[in-house]
Amino acid sequence: MKVDVSRETMDLLKEFQALAEKWNSRINLVSGSTLPAFWDRHISDSLQIFENAAPFSGHWADLGSGGGFPGIVLAVAFRETDLSFTLVESDQRKATFLRTAIRELSLTNAKVKCDRIERIPSLNADYVSARALAGLPVLLTFLDLHLRASGEAWLLKGRNWQAEVDEARENWAFNLETFPSKTSDEAAVLKVSEVSHV
């Protein structure tokens, strides 16, 4: 998948890939089976949010950041905007990796909060992202807590995304816009806004 980013952004993302692959032998940041296709499976996949979202300022919360997908990738791609990123990760070792990546890539627009998503006070974020974190019904409880009323969430979902949407609609009202994934025929990028309990 071709990604339209600057040379400097591409260089930083390659640096991040090298760092993640180095750490992956000690901490399971991504599945070992995906390492040969690391760029497409993780970086290009995360960049789909950058290609579809158009924010220039505000607070972006990445929930369950894990190995930095999509949080670190987006912080790199949006580093010349006025966005600030909070990466939420409860695993101490992964949080340490994220802080290392932020330092080594000189990302002054990002910080890490090491705690459980449901335990921290509302982040009141303008934007929220998540990838491979939980089913949509659970994600909506997180959005209800951390996404401001006028905000939008960008969620990378796999092959069961339509079933998750149908289940979520039983208890939640929300606006939904979908974009076909460029990295998997069955996956989708979901843009969710105006979340409320039914």
Image: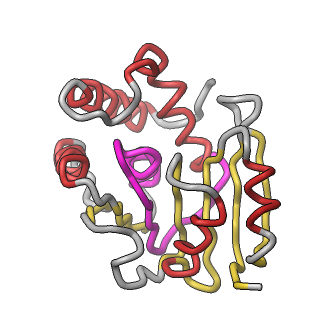
> Quick one: quadrant of the N terminus?
top right
**153, above or below 91, in the image:** below
Q: Residue furthest top?
A: 36
Read off the magenta span. Answer: 51-79
Q: Residue at x 58, y 66 (%)?
A: 138
Q: Position of residue 161 (x, y in %)?
A: 73, 48
Location of residue 141 (image quadrant): bottom right
- Name the spot of residue 102 as percent of width and height, x first: 24, 50
On screen, residue 15 above or below 37: below
Residue occupying the point 23% across, 34% down: 27
Quarter of the rendering containing residue 35: top left
**Is 44 positioned to the left or the right of 104 in the image?**
right
Along the viewing direction, whichever of 44 and 41 lies nearer the viewer? 41
- Vertical order, 118 against 67 (above or below): below
Q: Say whether residue 100 is magenta.
A: no
Q: Nearer the viewer, residue 138 or 186?
A: 138
Please tell me which residue lies in front, 44 or 165.
165
Residue 181 placement (x, y as % from top left): 71, 37
Q: Residue at left 63%, top 46%?
A: 51
Where does the C terminus fall, quadrant-wise?
Answer: bottom right
Left/right placement of residue 9 relative to residue 105 reads right
Residue at horizontal 35%, vertical 66%? 86
